[in-house]
Image: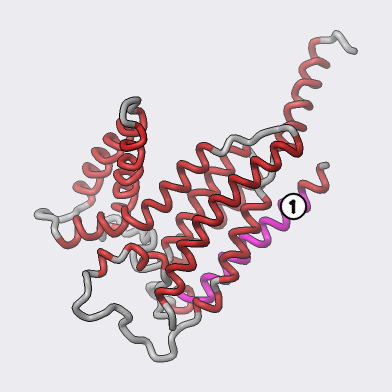
Amino acid sequence: MTTDPGELLDELAGLRKRARDDRHGYWFPLLLMGLLTLASLPLSQADPVPTDHLLEGGPGWWLDPLMHLRLKTEVVHPLALSLYWLGALVAGLLATVWWYRWRARRVGVETPTGAYVQVALLGLVAVLFGIPLSTSLFFEYSPIDPTLLVAAVAMTVLLGLALLAFRAKRMRPLLVPVGLLLASIALSLLQLPDVGVDLGMGGGAQFLAIATGLLTLAWIERSVLCSVIAVVFTAGALIVNNASVDNDALGGAMGVLLLAAVLVAGGLGALVASRTSS
């Protein structure tokens, strides 16, 4: 065994790198979410005779949290597509946590998934509750114009309250969901007209929920490749959600296929990279 400090440091750095490589398993969630996205294509086909699928006399659109799990274009079975994505997001979260725990037992190096679970839940809460609440409160019932300044102030206050809820030691089981809801409402204010970033208010919010989870995995994994894939997918989701206003094709099956291709190609590339390094 060497006693040279420089060589010892190099050895330690090598061990750390091998440990990081051993715990890298992000190819699985990438490939899984890519396949789940591909599986949604049969339900993503545009309705040849577009109609308003909302029931007349029913509750307002903002009371339908599943609406944001649809697409920008009218599809034949919008409710089935929404229910599919609700199940896919939950299944993807549970399968990813299971995968990392199984992998930890197999390779002996554990990747902490607590942050991923929290952010994934934040994305899910934002899709199901945050966006509907914010769009109804600020578009339908706000006594003042939701300008950029109003959005900035509201976001600051809501994120501050959410942080207090997350840091609370008492009544934590109650306050953490409240914090998730407040944070999701704050983030969804980016969709106000003066800000103009569409996170999926009219459909496609599921892709931004996936993106938040992937960005968190990239941070946890400390992987350049995972970071690049997550950033490319996030940019693609934002482009699809925002460009679909002027391009109907991107708001339907074509946009879904493009995003699925990023995830599947990224997952396969990460798998090959992990096999090569080992």
Residue at 45 percent across and 74 percent down: it is: 80
* Amino acid tagged 1: Leu
Q: Is residue 214 left or right of residue 50?
A: right
In this rendered view, identify the residue nearer to me: 181 or 106.
106
Residue 88 in picture, x, y percent from top left: 52, 61
Residue at 35 percent across and 25 percent down: it is: 169
Residue furthest left as drawn: 143
Q: Is residue 231 left or right of residue 169?
A: right
In this rendered view, identify the residue nearer to me: 131 or 189.
131
265 falls in the magenta region: yes
Residue 223 in picture, x, y percent from top left: 65, 41
> Tag 1, which secondary structure?
helix
Crowding near the residue tagged with mark 1, few <14, some 14–19, many ≥20 C-alpha atoms within 10 Å: some
In this rendered view, identify the residue nearer to me: 236 or 34.
34
Quadrant in the rendering for residue 11 = top right
Residue furthest right as drawn: 1
Q: Is residue 254 left or right of residue 197?
A: right
212 falls in the magenta region: no
Residue furthest top as drawn: 3
Q: Is any atom of residue 176 visible in this view?
A: yes
Residue at 50 percent across and 43 percent down: it is: 117
Q: Main secondary structure of the magenta part?
A: helix
Residue 42 in picture, x, y percent from top left: 55, 78
Q: Which residue is mark 1?
A: 271
Say above or below: 209 vs 19: below
For the C terminus, give its image quadrant. Answer: top right
Q: Which residues are magenta?
A: 252-273
Residue 163 in picture, x, y percent from top left: 33, 33
Say above or below: 201 vs 102: below
